[in-house]
């Protein structure tokens, strides 16, 4: 399945049905009177977060969504049927923006969350509604109100507990493939990863979701390389795993480059908890390892992990460090939810 994390679509709710002009005519009933029913309400347009989706690719092939018009009123005071709704099914983590792509309408972060994007028009009144003491036989009825229409942007930000960042060829995809069942493309050239990949990590009887995004290079926030558009997929993560390749001539500069891009991107990424690791360590001898670790520790201000996805060295230590941060964040969120629940009561 192809990956698509942004799409522009047109939505239109249904028009209301027209009211009816009708008069009751039955044998042995002297004064029948008006009995035209009201029109039905037009269908609404909803967006709903569902399980089992991780891309917006369906909205590349269909961009227009229109709900049905309400049924027209009929005689015998029969009201028209409500028009059928249209439901846009999107992955969890999808944000809905106005046509300017800046004004947030809603953010769907849980399975089953729904939001009404366009309300259907009200149905028109039938002639029985206009009956009065001075107007016993009204011959007028209202048309239904038109529905709402708008262009919107769907923007997906994947839901993951941890996200991997680093320069191209830092071993991000290899690490993801090692610790999860995901099968990302792996090759010895830059920008092998062209879209985010997700995998579920299981360690010590616990599990969390890990996201791998395309590599960053200097100037990514200005559109250099693939740019920083995929950084949105690690905005929701609780912790970042920053991999610096042991093949870099200057590991300190490589670390600083990625940190700079995270800061320039904003949205709180630079302030997220970070687990730092020197990856592809199996390519270095003992003396070179020690030198690279020392340089990276000096640049980051803390001791990095030594990691090799190929040999398994340091893999469990890194996973446990990520799990500790994730569990702390989960506990804080549970406490916060309990406090909110008490306030609501």
Image: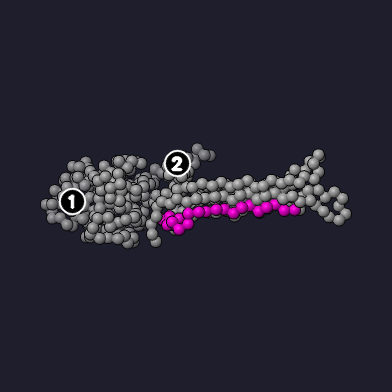
Q: Position of residue 255 (x, y in %)?
A: 22, 46
Whichever of callouts 2 and 1 sits on the residue coming sooner in the sequence is 2
The kind of secondary structure element at disc 2 is loop
Q: Which secondary structure dominates the residues rendered in magenta?
A: loop
Q: Position of residue 58 (x, y in %)?
A: 45, 58
Distance from the alpha carbon under mark 2 to that under mark 1: 41 Å
Q: Does the magenta stretch include residue 70?
A: yes
| Within-10-Å neighbours for mark 1: few <14, some 14–19, many 20+ | some
Q: Please tell me which residue lies in front, 139 or 35.
A: 139
Q: Where is residue 10 in the image (x, y as percent from the top left)?
A: 50, 50
Q: Where is residue 40 in the image (x, y as percent from the top left)?
A: 66, 51
Q: Please tell me which residue lies in front, 23 or 270.
A: 23
| Within-10-Å neighbours for mark 2: few <14, some 14–19, many 20+ | few
Q: Mark 1 points at which residue?
A: 248
In the rendered structure, the answer to whether residue 277 lies left or right of residue 155 reads left
Which residue is most to the top?
Answer: 343
* Residue 137 is at least partly visible in this image: yes
Rendered residue at 63%/49% (across/down): 16
Magenta residue span? 54-75
Q: Compared to 298, does 9 lie above or below?
A: below
The kind of secondary structure element at disc 1 is loop
* Residue 86 disc label: none
Q: Name the residue under label 2.
A: 103
């Amino acid at each position: 399945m192809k990956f698509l994390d942004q799409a522009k679509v047109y939505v239109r709710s249904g028009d209301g049905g027209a009211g009816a002009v009708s008069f009751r005519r039955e044998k042995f009933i002297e004064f029948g009177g008006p009995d035209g029913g009201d029109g039905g309400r037009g269908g609404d347009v909803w967006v709903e977060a569902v399980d089992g989706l991780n891309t917006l690719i369906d909205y590349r092939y269909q961009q227009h969504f229109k709900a049905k018009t309400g049924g027209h009123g009929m005689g015998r005071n029969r009201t028209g049927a409500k028009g059928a709704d249209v439901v846009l099914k999107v992955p969890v983590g999808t944000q809905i923006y106005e046509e300017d792509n800046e004004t947030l309408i809603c953010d769907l972060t849980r399975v089953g969350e729904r939001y009404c994007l366009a309300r259907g028009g009200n149905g028109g009144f039938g002639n029985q509604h206009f009956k009065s003491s001075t107007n016993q036989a009204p011959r007028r009825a209202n048309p239904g109100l038109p529905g709402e229409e708008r262009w919107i942007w769907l923007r997906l930000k994947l839901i993951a507990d941890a996200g991997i960042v680093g320069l191209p060829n830092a071993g991000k995809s290899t690490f993801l493939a090692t610790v999860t069942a995901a099968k990302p493309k792996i090759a010895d050239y830059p920008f092998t990863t062209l879209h985010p990949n997700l995998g579920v990590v299981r360690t010590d009887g616990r599990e969390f979701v890990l996201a791998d995004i395309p590599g960053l290079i200097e100037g990514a926030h200005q559109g250099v390389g693939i740019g920083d558009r995929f950084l949105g997929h690690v905005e929701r993560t609780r912790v970042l795993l920053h991999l610096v390749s042991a093949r870099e001539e200057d590991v300190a500069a490589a670390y600083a480059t990625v940190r700079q891009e995270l800061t320039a991107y904003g949205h709180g990424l630079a302030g997220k908890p970070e687990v730092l690791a020197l990856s592809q360590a199996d390519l270095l001898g003992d003396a070179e390892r020690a030198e690279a670790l020392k340089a990276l520790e000096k640049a980051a201000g803390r001791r990095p992990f030594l990691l090799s996805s190929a040999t398994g060295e340091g893999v469990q230590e890194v996973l446990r460090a990520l799990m500790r941060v994730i569990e702390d964040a989960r506990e804080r969120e549970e406490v916060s939810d309990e406090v909110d629940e008490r306030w609501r009561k």
